[in-house]
Image (cartoon, helix red, strand yellow):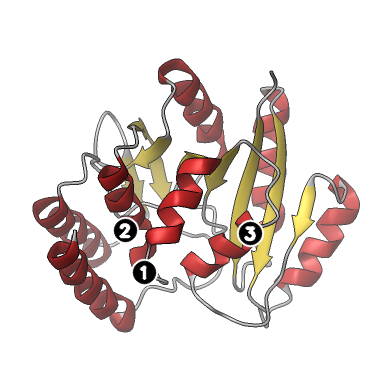
């Protein structure tokens, strides 16, 4: 039985990155002969991301590149919930649109999942050759600190709790999403906590994370405060 993979990509002001990302996904997935679709969930980007996506759709086809825009910026978690409604794949791949997640790792995720029949495969920056490139000391410190606190308080059985590059069995993703209360950046962290609660099997593949080339990072003081608040909530309730 041929498995199908749905790649969900939320976007907000990613008009420069999206053409490169889609081309790379097409390259690596077609090389590996996987059956796949890409679902772009744009949150009404003022920079014209959706218009760029429509031009890409003309190149790659409506069956391969599916556009499911929303009316505004409503949060990362809800973007995945929205995209999941339209996904036809047996497996769902979640990744960022800013080229920090290189599509060359997707076949590694798929092979690792197949080999061990895992419910979830998570990309990790923090073991077995994974790494981060392009971040200044402050950004690395925030990321390491957030991951350390998450590991200490939540014990998720995964080395990179704050990462967002993952493959899920569709049923596992649907069950985890249904129980999540987070809507922003903390959503990814909570997903692995819920997965642990449900007893889902989690594997890891080392990835190199590269800081965005175009556009502005959406991580700011508000997101950091929200992260700490939600981390303490998860610690108290899980």
Quadrant for residue 85, please give it. Answer: bottom right
Q: x, y percentage for residue 73?
A: 56, 80
For marks 2 and 3, the one nearer the N-term is: 3
Please give the residue where the numbered disc 3 appears in the rendered image: 83
Q: CA distance from mark 1 to mark 3?
A: 17 Å
Q: Residue furthest left?
A: 152
Is residue 17 visible in the rendered structure shown here? no
Viewer-proximal residue among 206 and 93: 93
Which residue shows up at 52% across the image and 42% down it? 171
For label 3, the SS is helix
Which residue shows up at 41% across the image and 37% down it? 120
Label 1–label 2 contact, CB within 8 A: yes
Quadrant for residue 33, please give it. Answer: top right
For label 1, the SS is loop
Q: CA distance from mark 1 to mark 2?
A: 8 Å
For label 2, the SS is helix
Please give the residue where the numbered disc 1 appears in the rendered image: 181
Q: CA distance from mark 2 to mark 3?
A: 18 Å
Checking the image for residue 190, the label placed there is 2
Q: x, y percentage for residue 125?
A: 31, 42
Q: Is residue 101 left or right of residue 159?
A: right
Q: Is residue 15 left or right of residue 137?
A: right
For marks 1 and 3, the one nearer the N-term is: 3
């Amino acid at each position: 039985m041929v498995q199908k993979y749905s790649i969900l990509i939320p976007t907000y002001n990613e008009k420069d990155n999206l053409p490169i990302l889609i081309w790379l996904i097409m390259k690596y997935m077609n090389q590996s002969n996987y059956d796949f679709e890409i679902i772009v969930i744009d949150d009404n980007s003022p920079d014209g991301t959706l218009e760029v996506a429509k031009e890409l759709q003309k190149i790659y086809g409506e069956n391969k590149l599916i556009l499911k825009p929303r009316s505004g910026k409503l949060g990362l978690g809800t973007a995945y919930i929205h995209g999941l409604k339209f996904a036809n794949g047996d497996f769902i791949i979640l990744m960022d649109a800013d080229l920090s997640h290189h599509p060359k790792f997707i076949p590694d995720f798929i092979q690792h999942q197949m080999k061990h029949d895992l419910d979830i495969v998570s990309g990790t920056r923090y073991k077995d050759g994974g790494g981060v490139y392009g971040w200044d000391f402050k950004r690395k410190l925030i990321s390491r600190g957030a991951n350390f606190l998450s590991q200490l308080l939540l014990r998720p059985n995964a080395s990179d709790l704050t990462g967002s590059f993952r493959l899920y069995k569709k049923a596992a993703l649907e069950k985890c999403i249904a129980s999540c209360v987070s809507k922003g950046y903390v959503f990814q962290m909570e997903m692995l906590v819920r997965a642990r609660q449900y007893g889902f099997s989690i594997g890891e593949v080392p990835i190199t994370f590269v800081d965005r080339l175009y556009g502005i990072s959406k991580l700011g003081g508000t997101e950091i405060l929200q992260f700490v608040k939600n981390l303490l909530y998860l610690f108290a309730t899980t």
